[in-house]
Image: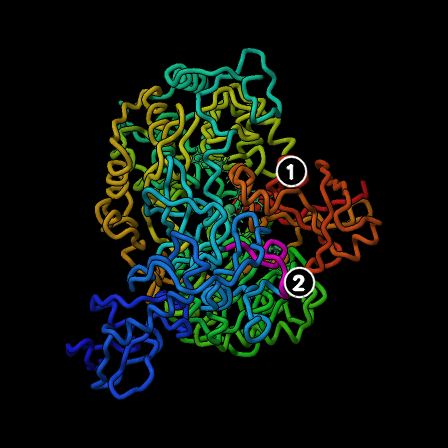
Amino acid sequence: MTRFILDGAEVEARDGETIWDAAKRLGHVIPHLCHADRKGFEPDGNCRACVVAIDGERALAASCRRRPTEGMNVVTMGERVERARRMVFELLWADQPEGTHFRRMAETVGVNGSRFSGRGARAPDFSHPAMAVRLDACIHCTLCIRACRDVQGNDVIGMAHRGAHSRVVFDLDSPMGQSSCVGCGECVQACPTGALLPKSNQAPERSVESLCPYCGVGCQVTYQVAGGIIVGAEGRDGIANEQRLCVKGRFGFDYGRHRHRLTTPLIRKTGAPKEPLDPANPLTHFREASWDEALDFAAAGLRRQMNSDEPRSEARPTAAAPARRLRDSKLAGLGSAKGSNEEAYLFQKLVRTGFRTNNVDHCTRLCHASSVAALLEGIGSGAVTAPVAEVANAEVIVVIGANPSANHPVAASFIKNAVRKGATLVVIDPRGQALDRFATHSLRFKSGTDVALLNALLHVIVAEGLTDTDFVAARTTGFEQLAEHVMAYAPEVMAPVCGIAAETIRDVARLFAKARSAMILWGMGISQHSHGTDNSRCLIALAMLCGHVGKPGSGLHPLRGQNNVQGASDAGLIPMMLPDYKRVGEDEHRHRFEQAWGVELDPNPGLTVVEMMHAAQAGRLRAMYVMGENPAMSDPDLSHAREALASLDHLVVQDIFLTETAMLADVVLPAGIFAEKTGSFTNTDRHVQMGRQVLDPPGQARQDLWIIQELANRLGLDWHYDGPREVFAEMATLMPSLAGITWDRLEAEGGITTPAGKAILFDDRFPTADGKARLVTASGIAPAESVDADYPFILTTGRVLEHWHTGSMTRRSQVLDQLRPQAEITVNPDDLAGLGVADGGGLRMESRRGAITAAAKADPRLPRGLVFMAFCYAEAAANMLTNPVLDPVAKIPELKVSAVRLHAL
Ligand SMILES: Nc1nc2c(c(=O)[nH]1)N[C@H]1C(S)=C(S)[C@@H](COP(=O)(O)OP(=O)(O)OC[C@H]3O[C@@H](n4cnc5c(=O)[nH]c(N)nc54)[C@H](O)[C@@H]3O)O[C@H]1N2
Ligand SMILES: Nc1nc2c(c(=O)[nH]1)N[C@H]1C(S)=C(S)[C@@H](COP(=O)(O)OP(=O)(O)OC[C@H]3O[C@@H](n4cnc5c(=O)[nH]c(N)nc54)[C@H](O)[C@@H]3O)O[C@H]1N2
Ligand SMILES: [Mo]
C-alpha cells in the first residue's frame, strides 16, 4: 500500500498499481490511448493522453506508467493537464474515423474537431479478408505491436523506418494479407484509433456475453448484434482467454447465415438414392415437411427397430427381478460435443431409456478416448489435472503430439508468454510447428514411435536415479515393474527406432525430472494410434515418477478438442459409462440411475463409434440418431463408413447444414446453431461456462434441446423440461462432479470450475481405490501400417488453423474459407521434387482404402517420407484413406498413420 494524494484527497494505491490504475479503481476517468488496461500489455506511456500533474515536477507525467510514491500529490484535472490532453487529441484528430476508441476519448476531453490538417492519403491496405489497415490514422501508440508480440506471441507487427517516416509494418513491410499474420485480430481489438479495424465495422445495436463455439479452450466472447445478425466478436475477460481470441473466434461467427443453412425439416423422397448431393439443393432428394410430420416419421423409423419383447419403462428392476441383459439393440445414437451439457445429458438419457441400449457415443471416441482410458486406469480421473493457465507457473512445459498454435491458439499464446517469462519448452512432434521457435528442444522423431521415445525417457529417469522417491513411494503403485520394464529401453537402443539421438533423450529426461514443476500437454499425436492408450500410460508414468502433479505449474493436460467434449463425456455420451464415468456394469451405480429415470437399464457396454459402423454394415444395427456429428467425413475409412450409414434402414440426422452425413439420412432435423441457444459448456480446464442465446433460429430451425425432447416424447418418454435450467438441475442431483453448481450461480458468475472449484487436482490423493496412482507399463508396438514398396509414404492427418474438422462450419464462414480456400497435401520439398511435382501442382494420394486428389504444398517442416493433410475438405476427404484399425482398450482408430503413395496428376 502506498498513500498519496489524488485531486486533493488522500488515497491508497495497491501494490503494483500505477497512478492510472489507482485512479480508475477510485472512479476517476483519465483518458487513455496507448494504454490497454489489460493483463499482458505493459504500459508504454507514449501517447500523452493520460498525463497528470505531479507536485514538484516540471513536466506532466504519463499516469499509465507512473507509480505513486508515498505522499505524492497528483492532479488529474484542471486547466494545465486538460489543455495538454486536448492538444494531443486535436493533433491526432484529423485522420480518425468515427466510432473508435479515439473518438470516445476525444469526447471526454471536449475535442470534436481540429485546427490541424490530416497527414493526407496513404493508400489503405485491404489485403486481408477480415481486417483493414489505414496507417493515416495510426498514432504510433504501439498497442498493436504489444498485442501481437507480448500478448499473442506472434511477432508479425513491428515499427520500421526512422523519424517522421517511422510506421507500423507487417513482417518486412508486406501487405497484411500476405504477411505471416494468423488473423487473431488482437491488434484490432487493441487499436484505439481507426488504423486497424475489422473490415465490416458495423455499429452494434446490442451485445451478448457468450462463448466461442469452436475449440475446448472455451474463450469468452462478447457478440455484437445489428440488424438481426452478429456483426462482431470481442474477447471477454474469461478465465481461459483473458480477452484473447483466435481467427475462428473473432471472425468465424457468420456460418449460421450461410445460404446452405437448414431451415425446414426434410424427409427423403421415396426411392431417392442415398448418395452425395449438392448441399444447396437438398430438394432433389428430399421434400420439405412440417415438424410434426418429420418428428413422427423420425420416431416411427426408430420404433420399427426396437426389440418388441423389451420391458417397457414401468418395469423397474427390483430385488426379486434384478436387471437382466437386454437383447442386442438395433439402434444407436451419436451425440454431440458441439452441444451443451444439457443437450448431451438428454441425448444419452434418450438413447438409454428410449432406445433401451448403451449404444451411445460421440466424437471423443476419435479424439481423447485413449487418453481418458489411460487416465482412468492410472489416476482414476479422465479430465485434466491442471488448467492450461498453470503453464505460467511451470519450469518445464512439454507439448507432445499437439499443435496448439493451430488448434488451441489462445492456449498457445499463454505457453508463449510463459516461455518469454523463463519457462523451458520441449516440443515432441514428427512435424515442425509454430511453437518450435519458442522451444529449447524440438524433437522431430519418427511418427508412431512415442512409446519407444517415452520409455527411453523413463529409462533415463530410473537409471540415473532422478525419480521423486518420496512421491513415488507415497503416491504410486507399480514402480518396481515399471522400473524393470524400462530397463530394456536405453536411449542408445531406442535412438535408431525413434530417430532422436541418445544424448538428446538424456538431456530432455534430466531437464524434465530436475524441474521443480512441469506440465505435459498432449493431443491427437498421442491419442489417435492403435497404441494410443500405451502412449498416454507413458506420459502419466513420466509425470508420476517426477512428482509433477497436484501442485502449481504441474500436471497432466490432454488438450480437449471440441468446445464441449469434456462436458459431453461427463454427461454420459459414452457407451460404457453413465454420467460422471459410472460404469454401466456396476450394479450400484446403474441402480441409482434406474431409480432416478424409472427404467431398467442395460448393464452391458454399448457400441463405440467405429464399432457402430461395422455393426451397421453387418446389418446388426438398423437405425441411428445422429446429432451434431458428421461421421461421413470424420470417421476413418470413409467409403466403408458411408456405405454403413447408407445401409441403415433409418437414419435421423439433426444438424445445421446438409452435411455429408445428412445426405445419407432418411429425415433431417434443422437445429439452431451455438449462438441460437443457451446452455452450459465445459472447457478443457473443467471450467463450466454459460453460452447465452444471441439470435433466434432462422425459419423453422429449432433448438437442439427442443428437438431431442420432442423425439423422446414420441418414443414414449413423457419429458417436460422447461429449458436448460431444469435439465441442469436434474444433472446436478445425479452427478457429484457438479456438486455446488447451480444454474443461478452459473448465470451470475459466468463460469465455475469442477469439481468443487479446484483448478489443480490431486494434491494429496488420487480418486482410485487405494488413493494411489497406478504405474502401467507400455511396450513399443509399431503402428498397424508401415511403408513398403507399394505405399512408400506415411500420411498423418490433422487440422489447420482456419478450419474446423469436417469443414461444415468454417468452410461456410466467409473469412475463414477465404483464408484457406483449397485442399492441400503438405509434403517435404525434396519429396515433392522427387515426385516431379511443383509447389501447388496436382497430386493423387492413394492408400489401401481409397484415393483423393488435391494440390501439393511444399513444407520443409515435414520430414521426408511423411505427408500431412487436414480432414476438412469434402472434395478431397482425407478419411477416404485412413486406417480404421482400433486401439484395443479405447477403440480409437489410428488416424495418425496410414501408408500411402503419391503421383503427379
Ligand atoms: N483449427 C482447428 N482447431 C481445432 C480443431 C479443428 O478441427 N481445427 N479440432 C479440435 C479438436 S476436436 C481436437 S481433438 C484438437 C486436436 O488438436 P491437436 O492434438 O493439436 O491436433 P492434430 O493436428 O490432429 O495433431 C496434433 C499433432 O500430432 C502430431 N503427430 C502426428 N503423428 C504423431 C505421432 O506419432 N506422435 C506424436 N507425438 N505426434 C504426432 C501432428 O504432427 C500434429 O502436429 O483440436 C481442436 N482444435
Ligand atoms: N483423419 C482424421 N479424422 C479425424 C481426426 C483426425 O485428426 N484425423 N480427428 C477426430 C477428432 S479428434 C474429432 S473430435 C472428430 C470430430 O468429428 P465430428 O464431430 O464429426 O466433426 P465436426 O465437423 O465438428 O462435426 C460437428 C457437426 O455438428 C454440426 N453442428 C455445429 N453446431 C451445431 C449445433 O449447435 N447443433 C447441431 N445439431 N449441430 C451442430 C456441424 O454442422 C457438424 O456437422 O473427428 C475425428 N476425425
Ligand atoms: Mo477431437
Image vertical order of residue 556 relative to residue 216, above or below: below
Mark yes or no: residue 812 visible: yes
Q: Which residue is mark 2?
A: 445
| Residue 755, picture quadrant | bottom left
Secondary structure mostly taken by the magenta-highlighted segment of the chain: loop
Q: Which residue is mark 1?
A: 877
For the point 51% across and 19% down, the residue is 666
Residue in front for this viewpoint, 720 or 595: 720
Q: Say which mark, if any, is on residue 15.
A: none
Which amino acid type is shown beneath numbered disc 2?
A: Phe
Q: Is residue 523 left or right of residue 209?
A: right
Q: Is mark 2 within 8 Å of ligand 1?
A: yes
Image vertical order of residue 515 relative to residue 378, above or below: below
The N terminus appears in which quarter of the rendering? Answer: bottom left
Residue in front for this viewpoint, 387 or 201: 201
Q: List x then y, in percent, for residue 273.
A: 61, 17
Part of the protein shown in magenta:
172-184
Image vertical order of residue 2 relative to residue 574, above or below: below
Q: Residues within 10 Å of mark 1 (few under 14, many from 20)?
A: many
Q: List x then y, in percent, for residue 869.
A: 66, 47
Which amino acid type is shown beneath numbered disc 1?
A: Ala
Separation of residues labelled 1 and 2 (CA atoms): 27 Å
Q: Is mark 1 within 8 Å of ligand 2?
A: no
Residue in front for this viewpoint, 364 or 844: 844
Q: List x then y, in percent, for residue 442.
A: 62, 67
For the point 36% across and 49% down, the residue is 222
Residue that extends furthest to the left in the rendered view of this protein:
9
> What is the secondary structure assignment of the residue under circle 1?
loop
